[in-house]
Image (spheres, rainbow, N blue to C red):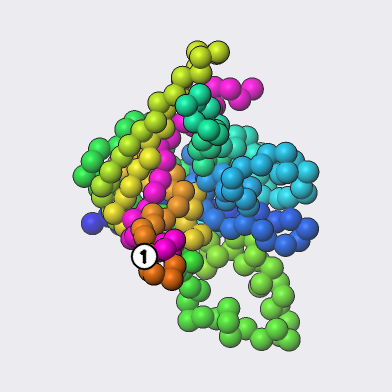
Amino acid sequence: MYQELYSHIAKACCAITVIEDDEVVSEGTGFTINADGQILTAAHVALGQWPVDLKKYADRDTKIIAKLPGISEYECKLAICGLEIRVSAFSKPVWVDFAALVPMHALPAPVPFLKSRVLSPSLGEEVFLAGYSEELEIPFGVDKLLRSDVSGAEDFYRAMSRGYLADMTGPLIKRGVIGNSRGIYARDSGSGKTISCEVIFVDNGMNPGASGGPVVNKEGEAIGIMTKRAITSAAQGKDPSLAIPSGCTVAISLHPLLAASRNVP
């Protein structure tokens, strides 16, 4: 029923790997938004940290690698990283967890992408979640069977560490329904600028690795970015702070991206 839609989403969903000093410090998902290979993802995926500390990031020598299924990996740089909302009534700023990446160099050919829709999602709307969730496994577990003393094994593991899981498995796509959507609207009294952002709850859960992946409507348009799993209390006498995943996914709408992009030279 959704074969064409799933194929469309899968082709535009990329594995994101952040490498520092030859070590992988962050892995997640992103999705291309135009044929030039520009990407949206979650800020904590692109930075390998949360909350955002841009000064700390600037002092690190990191590489952000994007890998689309069937297309060679390419290195990206941050164009937009998060959005800070300051409200006088809040004790500290609110950070919106999204990032925009652009290729370091022009790509040799156009890439598949998802059109974006900057509109409020509707309660009860059917949507699709896509990402390189840790639920995914390489078929038959061949990565666990590969002997380290065999020629080519090192190359295989190096490739996997740079996002080539995208070729071996593709993203995991799930269906869900928007069960709740709540927004924040803020206005800076000094500049007069305004910002709005909606937090979306989808009644299906994605696991680590899928962060930064798209929330897509039935028209194949990206309407949000997955940021985290929703959690619920599982308090016990010995551990009143214990929490577990609730089975829902939390995402943000693309409204703040539009606002932030206006401030990018």
Q: Element at badge 1?
A: loop
List the residue tagged with mark 1: 234
Vertical relation: 117 (above or below) 139: above
Q: Tell whether position 243 is magenta.
A: yes
Tell me if I can see residue 220 in this picture: no
Q: Position of residue 108 (x, y in %)?
A: 64, 44
Name the one closer to the observer, 107 or 143: 143
Q: Is residue 202 above or below residue 86?
A: below
In the displayed image of the protein, which residue is found farthest to the front? 237
Residue, x 60% and y 34% (percent of image)?
80
Residue 247 within the magenta-colored segment of the rendering? yes
Residue 264 sits above or below residue 240 on the image? above
- Residue type indicated by callout 1: Ala
Task: Please identify the quarter of the rendering in which residue 206 is found.
Answer: bottom left
Q: Is residue 254 found left or right of 177 in the rendered image?
A: right
Q: Which segment did they paint magenta?
A: 240-265
Q: Is residue 193 left or right of residue 179?
A: right
What is the quadrant of the N terminus in the image?
bottom left
